[in-house]
Image (cartoon, rainbow, N blue to C red):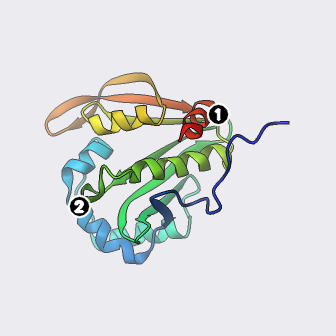
Amino acid sequence: MQEKPLVMPKNFWACDKIHLRSCCEADVEIYVNEEKDSESIRFLEGRVDPPRAAALWKEWIDRQAKQQDPNCLAFTIESLDQQIVGFANIRDWTNRAGTFTFGIRIFNAYQRQGFALDAAKIILRYGFFELRCQKANSSTIETNVKSIAFHQKLGFQAEGRIRRNDFTDGHYYDALLFGLTVEEFINVDKRD
């Protein structure tokens, strides 16, 4: 019989500083405004996309709120005082291989306050202990120093580099690949 690895919080979707909730129509304006931060988008996506109209954000949020994408769950990250501080998602999980990926973006005004770490712990717990995945995969553009340090703090291992995978700001950049097994996550999560 498998030992229960961690004590789960009473509210699975909350941590010390934040909670995750479903995206809703009231978030549209914030998403539209935050899309203007091209530097943050470049670090997150490895590119800058054309701005989306509020109507397109509303459509996307409606799909996410209804959980219509069978392989992606998106969340709004709220601080405990109900400020929207960013967004997160878990996606691309596969039953066959037991892997998943995720993304987290904390808006500039709220960075360096532990919100991303809390959001990642919730997402990772969900992937490992609810979706029955055994490994989280992640990647970041080589210039995203904050993301690299963040992955290391969570216990992710560097697994590779895809050379000249991203093109943005007139240059080619490598994508750095990271991986975290469920056992590695349990060891990191127990320390906190």
* 144 left or right of 67 in image: left
Q: Do the residues labelled 1 and 2 touch (CB within 8 Å)?
A: no
- Outermost right residue: 1
Residue 153 lies, in percent from the top left, at 42, 35
Determine the residue positioned at 29% across, 73% down: 29
* 56 left or right of 157 in image: left
- Outermost left residue: 170
**Numbered circle sitting on residue 51:** 2
Circle 2 packing at 10 Å, graded few (<14), some (14-19), many (20+), is few
Q: Is residue 80 above or below residue 42?
A: below
Whole-angstrom CA distance, mark 1 to mark 2, is 35 Å
Examine the image and state in which quarter residue 30 appears: bottom left
In front: 60, or 90?
A: 90
* 140 left or right of 102 in image: left
Q: Is residue 171 above or below residue 80?
A: above
Examine the image and state in which quarter residue 150 appears: top left
Which amino acid does the dot numbered 2 rest on?
Answer: Pro
Local SS, label 1: loop
Residue 147 lies, in percent from the top left, at 34, 38
Local SS, label 2: loop
In the picture of the structure, the residue carrying the numbered disc 1 is: 97
Residue 126 lies, in percent from the top left, at 61, 50
Circle 1 packing at 10 Å, graded few (<14), some (14-19), many (20+), is few
Which amino acid does the dot numbered 1 rest on?
Answer: Ala
